[in-house]
Amino acid sequence: MNVNYIWYFLTFLTLVSAIMVVVVRNPIHSVLYLILTFFCISAHYVLLNAQFLAAVNVIVYAGAIMVLFLFVIMFLNLREYTAESKTNLVKLGAAVLGGVLLVIIVAALRSMQIEPLNKATYNSQVGMVESLGKVLFRDYLLPFELITVLFFVAMVGAVMLGKRETGERNF
Amino acid sequence: MDSTVFIVRSIIIFVIFGITLLIATYSTYAERKVAAFLQDRLGPNRAGPFGIWQPLADAVKMFTKEEFIPAQANKWLFIAGPCFAMLTALMASAVIPFGDTVQYEGQFIAVQGIDINIGILWIFGIVSLGVYGVMIGGWASNNKFSLLGAIRAASQNISYELAMGLSIIAILMMSGSLSLRDMVNQQATPFLGVSGLNWNIFYQPVGFIIFLTCAFAECNRTPFDLPECETELVGGYHTEYSSMKLGFYLFAEYINMFVSSAVISALYFGGFNFPGQAWVASLLPAGALGHNLLTSIGVVVFFGKIFFFIFFYMWVRWTLPRFRYDQLMNLGWKTLIPLAILNIVVTGAGLLFDFKPATWLIVIFVVVLAVISAAQPRKTMRPQQSTV
Amino acid sequence: MLSIISLSLFGILNLFLGFLKSRRVLLPATLLFIALAFAANLLDWNHQYVYFRDMLRTNNLFINFSSIILLTTFLTVAISRSFGTDEEHTHPAEYYAIMLFSVVGALMMVGFENLIMLFIGLEILSVSLYVLTGSDKRSLRSNEAALKYFLMGSFATGIFLFGIALVYGATGSFNLSAIGSYVSGGPTTGISPLLYVGLLFILAGMLFKVSAAPFHFWTPDVYDGAPTLFTAFMSTVVKTAGFAALYRLLTVSFTGVYGLWWQVLTGVTVLTLLVGNITAVYQSSVKRMLAYSSVSHAGYLLIAVAAKTPQSPSAILFYSLAYSIATITGFAVLILVAEQKPIEGRPDERYEAFNGLAKRNPLLAFSLAVSMVSLAGIPLTAGFWGKFFVFSTAVDRGMTNMGMVLVVAVLMSVVGVYYYFRVIIASYLKTGDSEPIGIRPLYRFILVLTTALTIGLGLFPDVVRQLF
């Protein structure tokens, strides 16, 4: 079987589902399409022989974050998204800006030259857990440790903002 | 890939698929029999000898019942919900190593769907997706009780997934591999001349208890079956479901039970290894036949372990009462997660100082603490503070 | 490096101090922690270190920038008087801890040698500020500001990260010098176009964080909605760290494509100066005016970055120092004055609140006047020399390149004089109620200190400039 066809199919699916995230009006459908998008991205990781990233992508994004998304949207119980009416000027501005961005990126990608893969020096194990772990805990040890500060701040902040104060209204 | 390997592999995959379904089917029967036994009843005994055809009768009933979709329900998602539940339940069994290798025409073929080097992460990922079936179905029913059930399921699964993942990390630190097959093979080495004493349960008692508890919660089994708690929520997330769509949900639960039993057996109880393995191997004829025979004995042993844990699930179900919701959350966040982190730290220290059974110290500590607190005179209970 | 580690630990220690019954220990403890980090920072003076496989580089420039950041944080913490006594702030330990953590992020942004470090530092700083902005939980304005800041900030971070990814795609490295050698060395196939797109995205993300003009829309609302103390913190520490990071990134990695980002930056500079100064004129609230003034100061700082002369870092340093001290003085006075007579439970931040301040409390009025004069850039204050050094970098670069920017900057300085002097006029020439305003000793000390610093730096700029 030719891997190229799988790649094309996956890319098609990724793009379609990503576009559907924005296009569909029902927020729940939107979230489900987003989950599908994450799956497609994970499949791309698998094609790149990065199995660990693929699994972690599914676990973290599809398995945890999107569940919380769905959770919140279900609580809000938004059946149908009623778009606040935007003026034509805003729509036009958004379209122009987005279009310019698209043109810039497409132009950059088109004029880019990708060096062909050197089969002799290519290391197929580069995406595996072992090499990833070595890079993470040797070369990128300092950022890895400092990320804990980031998460800690986020956690302290979330607890602080979410905690009920004395004298606050208890719904 | 060689064509023979391909064919044998496909056969193995189909067999695993079929066995998963078969075991799930007969788990329903077993559940009723075990329940009857524990409650001193007879249980199903009309369809066939000992009621052995009961699952078939149930299936016929499920298929022929009226299919009902509520008028205000979101039709597509209403149908998709049980399908998701079934899909995610079935996908997990792909990476479980049911047995050692089969020798066929000089080639060794693993008795396993796929042997990827991130097997445990695969299972973890699929399990974390399992909640979607419940959430989607519960939301699409357009029913308050269903929605509450779905939300309970989601929060419960997320809470217990954390502790589960943390308890797995301790095992990963000991084995140094994410592949389930590697983990199982590492437990095969004999300790003090006895194979079977090197199982992870002897090194990770705390991790095992945490994992087991979380597995109960992930499968929505009693005492954690809050999402379908009938006294509070009618039927929970599947209130509006009928016929085979309901059947799918119930079925998915039993498949999850099977898969989690298999994972527990593989992670903590040596998988397809059994005590006296080397002795049995020496009795068998050498060559392909002996190897394959040993593998099949291993498979049988593995299924024996799985059946024990399935029985354990049912045993617990008919023994323990259901948790209250705040108790469930407190247990998950305030007990299991700190305990799991402590377990990781102690395991790491144990690996550093080359003392693998270090986590028994936690067990001893907890037991001593329990004894001390039990010996003290009982204080007056504070009124329970309920949190939403 | 020692300061980063010690601040992370002190933050955690601070949280534990929150368990103590007495909240009084928190403020001195936090001040002590910052002072210790400051001292730890100075240990490396005149040494060059690269830590953890090219992740962090400390040299005198790093120490200068981080000293300014720590000094600003020290001053901000010292004027945080409302913590602890107020019922709204029942968790002062958390606020102090988050402030300490955010300084960790700022220091990472100053000393990064790898784009990953820059990203994480930026995120730590931003996330802390999202929380601090929303810390006034019962105020709708604060909630709105926090949400707005969070949504827009995370979008900007996303664009920034996309830019980093594209630069990585072009150069194959996150390392600053590796990117620099790719850009200036010129690979055989020519510079990949992805690099240009990536650079633009990174610029957009960074310019958002320092609130330069087309990306400044969040600034007034967020600065206005956040508790004033954190507005002071935000408008000083983020700017210093942001400009240090921007300058470092652009000069170390992208010197080879100066022609590209110079054009972008001069355009942004002109726009920022125009928008910041002209909109500030129309504000009726002093807090909002200060918000727009911070936009305009971002414009002045951008001049030094765009000029990219050898004098640029010292100009940026001096300007940040002068601006930070003056801004903190301004906000410190604003906090006291605004809370004197709240309107509908909200602090009164209009110009009218300052009427007759000179009679009510001459010290406050004088500090305010000095800080406003410094922000406006009048001689004999630090702000004048800040502007002078910044403008001289532009002159060094050459009038053909920077002439337009200089003309706009000088004109806008004149506009700035108008709105800064409105506050001074209100406090000295207008009459208001004569109820005196009491100040705590520490607060008074900080005000005297910052005022003295502003005037001292205005009289003897070379004292500090020798260090830069």
Image (tube, helix red, strand yellow):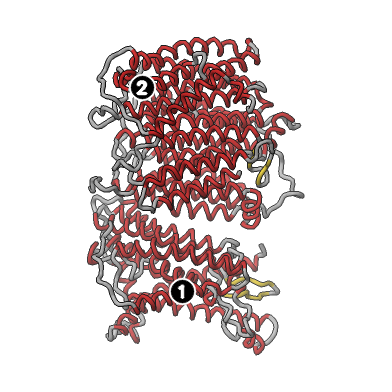
Amino acid type indicated by mark 2: Val
Q: Is B288 left or right of C299, judged from the image as shown?
A: right
Q: Measured along the vertical axis of the image, is residue B230 above or below residue C205?
A: below
CA neighbours of label 1 inside 10 A, class few (<14), some (14 to 19), many (20+): few
The secondary element bearing badge 1 is classed as helix
Residue C36 x %, y %: 54, 43
Residue C56 visible in rendering: yes
Residue B66 x %, y %: 26, 63
Name which quarter of the figure residue B221 lies in. bottom left
Residue visible at 33% across and 12% down in the picture: C429
Where does label 2 land, which residue? C286
CA neighbours of label 2 inside 10 A, class few (<14), some (14 to 19), many (20+): many
Where does label 1 land, which residue? B365
Residue visible at 40% across and 30% down in the picture: C444
Image mark 2: chain:
C
Q: Give the distance between the C-alpha atoms of the residues marked 1 and 2, in whole angstroms.
A: 61 Å
The single residue placed furthest to the front in the displayed view is: C441
Q: Is B294 left or right of B223, judged from the image as shown?
A: right
